Image (cartoon, helix red, strand yellow):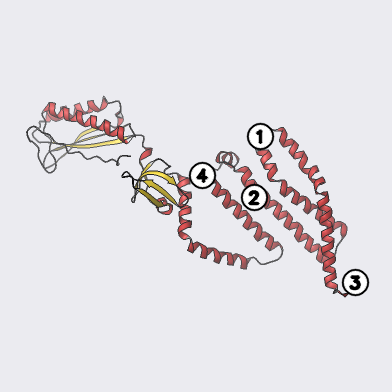
Amino acid sequence: MDLIQLWNELPEEARNNLIRIGLAALVLVLIWGLRRLLAMIVVAPLRRVAQRTNAQWDDILLDAIMLPARLLIIAVGLSVGVQILQIDTSTYVFVQHLIRTLVIVAALTAVYRAVDALAPSSPRLFRVTGITITERLLPFVRTGVKLLVIALMIVIIVQEWGYDVSGLVAGLGIGGLAISLAAQDTIANLFGFTTIVGDQPFVVGEFIKTPDVEGTVEHVGVRSTRIRQPDQAYVTVPNSKLASSAILNWSRLSKRWLNLTLVLNYGARRVEIETFLERVRELLNANEKVEPDSIVVRLINFTDIGMEVLIRCYITLPDWGEFTAEKEKVYLELLRIIEEMHLRIATRSLILEKGGQFMVDASEIEAPPN
């Protein structure tokens, strides 16, 4: 009797609200009881079909849509229940909002789970979408897409229930601006990391040179990259600075450039110069490590101290140590030809003739040893 009296004492609006809540709860209980039956009718046949195939992507995709499928079943059950119960207008509007919310959550949950199902690795992502993303960058892409899906879900659901999201978006924008200003260095380094991993101007173990540092890359982190210099100094460079710098990667050479200028004394006769040029060409052509099409041996200039002879070619040895050893052999052979022909070599600052000793003016445009 007390409950009946308490019920009668409640305002009419409160009683109507309680009735609507009770009816909604009853419908949910009925739907929850029928959920397994509906799942067996809809999901079980799909799972049997997926088990008959040898591919794994259909099994992964089916697991991803299980929860969205259950939510859609609940939404369908609610829609049928509303039609059967013939509830009042306000309750009907409430249930319609709830049904649409379940559909929104189901759809975006399917997208959320499909991110892991369709992009567990870079090769599979390429096969499905045709997009190529570096394996190390893929976890960041997946996380970013998931966060975007969650934010989109929240905004759509809030808007579905009739709330103005413009104030929320503006508040989030102001908060995001404050956070970005406070953590701009961290964000810049993160974007620098994505640039390094995405473009791959270098990888761990390669020798690089920038305006600020040169050495062997030992570690590429989210915030910074660590480089071991030739003098064994360990340098940590922020990724934002490294990504915006010009990077010279000496480890990706297929060949190295030999660039030499000899200055012959004017005492040499024209025939001797022609013979010297021909012998140098023969020397380089006979070398298996020299690229034949790259050989340039020319008399290029008359200076105040002598005649400049340009000698250029590519040596097909990318390793610095092997290249310098081969370059040494070429230089020694050049000195042998000079001695045999009794030519005189001059520098830009001194004309040489000291007890039969010869000196060479050589300019080599090459990198430090790596």
Report how far apart the C-alphas of labels 3 and 2 lie in the structure.
50 Å
Q: Give the residue at x 83% y 71%.
A: 14
| Horizontal arrangement in the rendering, residue 24 relative to residue 339 (left or right) | right
Tell me if mark 1 has few (under 14), some (14-19) or many (20+) residues whose alpha carbon lies within 10 angstroms of its own.
few
Residue 197 at least partly seen:
yes
Report how far apart the C-alphas of labels 4 and 2 lie in the structure.
20 Å
| Horizontal arrangement in the rendering, residue 298 relative to residue 51 (left or right) | left
Q: In terms of secondary structure, where does tag 1 sit?
A: loop
> Where does the image place residue 364, in percent across and percent down from the top left?
24, 39
Nearest to the eye among marks 1 and 3: give it.
3
Residue tagged 3: 2
User: Disc 3 residue type?
Assistant: Asp
| Horizontal arrangement in the rendering, residue 303 relative to residue 4 (left or right) | left
How many numbered marks does the figure carry? 4
Residue tagged 2: 112
Q: The N terminus lies in which quarter of the figure?
A: bottom right
Dot 1 or dot 4, earlier in sequence: 1
> Where does the image place residue 231, in percent across and percent down from the top left?
31, 45
User: Disc 4 residue type?
Assistant: Arg
Report how far apart the C-alphas of labels 1 and 4 lie in the structure.
25 Å
Q: Give the residue at x 78% y 45%.
A: 39
Q: The C terminus lies in which quarter of the figure?
A: top left
Dot 1 or dot 3, earlier in sequence: 3
Residue tagged 1: 55
- Farthest residue to the right: give it: 1
* Dot 1 and dot 4 residues touching (CB under 8 Å): no
Report how far apart the C-alphas of labels 4 and 3 lie in the structure.
67 Å
Residue tagged 4: 136
* Dot 4 and dot 3 residues touching (CB under 8 Å): no
Nearest to the eye among marks 4 and 3: give it.
3
